Image: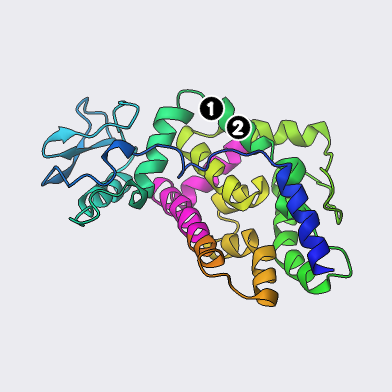
Amino acid sequence: VIVMFAGQRAALLLTRPRVAHFSQVPAVHQSISGRTRFYKKVDVIPTPDGKAGQYSITLDGRVLKTPGRNPLILPNLNLAMSIAAEWDAQTNKRMGIQPVNMPMMSIASTAIDQIQVDRTHAVDTCMRYLPTDTALFHAPDYDRILQAQQKKHFLPVLEWAQKELDMNLATSQSMAGRIEHPEAAYNKLRSILEKMDYYTLTCVQGATLECKSILLSLAFISRFIDLEKAIAASRIEEEFQVEIWGVVEGGHDMDRLNNAVRLSSVGTFMSMYLDHEQIQQQWKRWKE
């Protein structure tokens, strides 16, 4: 029974869009990967144009740019300080500079170089997950243990989506296909995504890809669920299999680590970008 369900689930995953995760996009200066640190001092300064509340980062006095050679302008001091800290932490002489250890830089660069220029791809990517959204597919009744875990984590999110988004979405116990939703649900979701600023949309896209769920992503970004719950909800089926068959070293353990790093990076970026009151204000505007 377990193998059958896992196989059906694998078939469903094959129908999902294959797109690069934001941390896999060459959003940080990949050409310097492994290079010996070439700067001594990292500073945060107000942007040269003097625009209030915006900051740049300098390496030995030179203003840092994105991989797309765009000005790296951060919307507040917290984000600027966090990215400056990533650059300042590149002190391993043997490994050299490791862009993989700069998740805040990666998110900011992706937002500036890609999402700010053309948000269409990011919106479409998120939208494509709704028919196969992880939160909408539940195990059959004979898999009661797995089903119970799914209901524990998914049902509160579905109730939240119905209340906050006015979206009464169908669920399925069949893993063989896609769920058809009313056109109004797609229009509502697209409207929300298109109203988001490019930093928030970048984070939503990253969380969607990691959770295989636009619903879990929105619940996480809006802070209806916290990081711990987002991680647990995104890994229900894999952890269920681990409990039965055990951990495959170099496989499950790395998946856990990558999942935690990617979602915590998104959560950290958003918490530094918008505080609780600000995110609630934005959420009201997005829903209008």
Q: Dot 1 lies on which element?
A: loop
How many numbered dots are placed on residues in this image? Answer: 2
Residue bearing the label numbered 1: 119
The kind of residue on which mark 2 rests is Val
Q: Where residue 247 appears, x then y in whole percent?
A: 59, 73
Work out how far the residue at label 2 is from the one at label 1, CA to CA, in angstroms.
6 Å
Quarter of the rendering occupied by the C terminus? top right
Q: Which residues are magenta?
A: 258-286
Q: Are marks 2 and 1 in contact (CB under 8 Å)?
A: yes
Q: Nearer the viewer, residue 165 or 170?
A: 170
Q: Where residue 118 appears, x then y in whole percent?
A: 51, 23
Q: Judge whether residue 166 can be spotted in this image.
A: no
Other residues around mark 2 within 10 Å, as few (<14) / some (14–19) / many (≥20)? many
Which residue corresponds to the image point at 58% horizontal and 25% vertical from the top-left? 120
The kind of residue on which mark 1 rests is Arg
Name the mark on residue 123. 2
State the predominant SS element of the stretch in magenta: helix
Q: Where residue 133 appears, x then y in whole percent?
A: 72, 48
Name the mark on residue 38. none
Quarter of the rendering occupied by the N terminus? bottom right
Q: Quadrant of residue 243?
A: bottom right
Which residue corresponds to the image point at 81% horizontal and 46% vertical from the top-left? 168
Looking at the image, is 4 positioned above or below residue 44?
Answer: below
Q: Is residue 191 left or right of residue 136?
A: left
Instruction: Give yes or no for residue 25 being in the magenta stretch.
Output: no
Looking at the image, is 62 positioned above or below residue 16?
Answer: above
